[in-house]
Image (spheres, coloured by chain):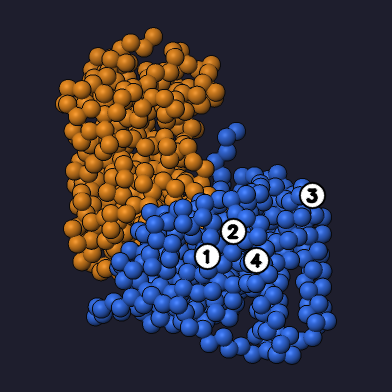
Chain colours: A blue, B orange
Amino acid sequence: MATENPRPKLTQSSPSLMASNDELIKYYSEMLLIRRFEERVGQLYGMGLIGGFLHLYVGQEAVVVGVENAISRQDPMITSYRCHGHMLARGEEIGRVLSELAGKASGSSKGKGGSMHMFSPENGFYGGHGIVGAQVPIGTGIALSLKYRRLSNVCFTFLGDGAANQGQVYESYNMAALWKLPIVYIIENNQYGMGTSTARAAAQTEFFRHGEGLGIPGIQCDGMNVLAVRDSALEAASFVRAGNGPMIIEMNTYRYRGHSISDPAKYRPKEEVKEVRETRDPISQLEQVISERGILKAENLKEIDQKIRLDVRNAAEIAREAEQPASSELYTDVYATQAITDD
Amino acid sequence: MIDISVRQALNEAMAEEMRRDDDVFLMGEEVGEYDGAYKVTQGLLSEFGPRRVIDTPITEAGFAGVGVGAAFMGLKPIVEFMTFNFALQAMDHLINSAAKTRYMSGGRVTCPIVFRGPNGSAARVAAQHSQDFSSWFAQVPGLKVLAPYSASDAKGLLKAAIRDPDPVIFLENELLYGKRFKLEEEIIEPEAIGVAKILRPGSDVTIISFSRGVEWCLEAAITLDQSGTSCEVIDLRSLRPLDMKTIVKSVKKTNRLLIVDEGWPSMSIAAEIAFRVQDEAFDYLDAPVMRVTSKEVPLPYAANLEEMALPNENKIINAIGSMK
């Protein structure tokens, strides 16, 4: 019954980059929603509606949108604390995500989780985890449950380049390869783990090679190109679904903002950010394809943008107006039944 | 009359729950082909096969997290730590991932999981393999913490832990595994979580303990009874939730309290109970609450020093003798 591990395939992905007009517009709209959402959220933080830690996904939109469009909602997804984009891509209502950021009862976690702890299990999204790397064994356990239940689904576990160096990531790779678990590890390499560049943190900065010794195939992908992302996710999903065990995809991407809202990002030159924005921006790139192919005119694209901006603004208004959690919520959801109170 | 060891009781609890529910599975180091480092899982692989009895690599952080992920999906993992000393490597998943996710998700993602294995000192294995973690876990909202003494509780409470919808830390004791108990009848149903048990009624002093400490208390109570001191011995069984009702009721009757806790005294289970008893029954105490605990040192290897560091029945007898 045991089959030999296929030879590790360590390659650049070879995307088909094929997409229908409708698909291109869909990807464009989904990325733009995340962009506008995050921009607005950054402003709302400054205005005091949102507190605590806040990690924005601006610049990395193609990664989650590309993956989401390669799989179904029955394929679970899990990530770290940079999770707003994943919530939106998985289909959680904008208002619930924004309300959660505002700490309101109408939030996706009733206001008890905040920016880093968001979940949408009905849509196959299992968080939203605040401790760097912790989501990786958890995602591996989700994959174990899929195999245990003899389902053909694949778990997509997202981690950053910073988390990729963690011991528990190696432990997870080992178990996933050993037990041939249905999991794809998506490394969102945005080039910096907080303020430390990959070159200063990893002895091997080609993260798709990190499973090499365990026989886990890895592919490297342009994470700023949504079609390339989608194709690499399709390729990995089909390899993993066939029962071959895990696969790693390194998505080379970039975050335009600091690690968190309070990070002025002094560790990288402004020109670096400017250059990526001007030459590799995932949304601009797709906009260009849509224009060049004559799918939509500039004014149609603008209409899409305006509609999204309006949706986000409305969601922000809903969040602002919403009630804070009732004080009775303090002790709920600690346990299934009664909480242990201290009085 | 049934004669059964704690080891057998734990084994039966797992086997019966696994027969009852296909979502229950077991994972950990040496739980399968080796039949368990302490033989608690003996025979489970041969009955349930490798899908449900999973031998893991020696990577606690990783497999504890894997268990949590499986529980998020509705499976009911039993994760064995060969000893709880090794759970330190996995602490982030026990506390941050297992205990807090129900709350942080507003009840949308839950974690029905059991982490079990031997806790506390064994014999002569020195500091890194001899620590009582009861107070560490019992401090955390979102966790339930059980520490049974008897074979019937080992079985009934482990069954309850496996069926519980929340994460349960199930603290066993290596030196109790071989201890045999006589049961009136077979334990089939889960025992209620959060209820202490009076093992020996008495009128002069209440002695509270859990896990192996109960053994010392019962032996001390027999000796003390012969010299005319009647001890009421309470087995906590559950450390979180803590059954204050039973404790306070007993203290109101005996007016004296001694707590026996294998952990270190600072910030301990004993300290917490003492606080709560003065809070709830101050006027009923005829003497200051006393405690017998381990000494504030890493557990030494040398036999004489080890004995000095740990509680035992003589230390309990002496403590009660010195009570005002």
As measured in the structure, the alpha-carbon distance from the residue carrying label 2 to the one carrying label 3 is: 21 Å
Say whether mark 2 and mark 4 are on the same chain: yes
Q: Earlier in the sequence, mark 1 or mark 4?
A: 1
Label 1 crowd (10 A; few <14 / some 14-19 / many >=20): many
The amino acid on which the numbered mark 2 sits, given as a three-letter code, is Arg
Q: Nearer the viewer, mark 4 or mark 3?
A: 4
- The chain ID associated with circle 2 is A
> Farthest residue in the left direction?
B303
The circle drawn on residue A82 is 2
The amino acid on which the numbered mark 4 sits, given as a three-letter code, is Glu
Q: Earlier in the sequence, mark 2 or mark 1?
A: 2
- The chain ID associated with circle 1 is A
Tally the marks.
Answer: 4
Label 4 crowd (10 A; few <14 / some 14-19 / many >=20): few
- Where is residue A193? Give x, y as percent: 52, 54
Q: Nearer the viewer, mark 2 or mark 1?
A: 1
Using the image, determine if residue A277 lies above or below residue A326. below
- Where is residue B207? Give x, y as percent: 36, 25
| Label 3 element class | loop
Using the image, determine if residue B163 lies above or below residue A286. above
Q: Earlier in the sequence, mark 4 or mark 2?
A: 2
Residue beneath disc 1? A188
Say whether mark 3 and mark 2 are on the same chain: yes
User: Residue at 46% across / 53% down in the picture?
Assistant: A200
CB atoms of marks 2 and 1 within 8 Å: yes
Answer yes or no: is residue A279 visible: yes
Q: Earlier in the sequence, mark 4 or mark 3?
A: 3
Residue beneath disc 4? A275
- The chain ID associated with circle 3 is A
CB atoms of marks 3 and 1 within 8 Å: no
- The chain ID associated with circle 4 is A
User: Residue at 70% across / 90% down in the picture?
Assistant: A293
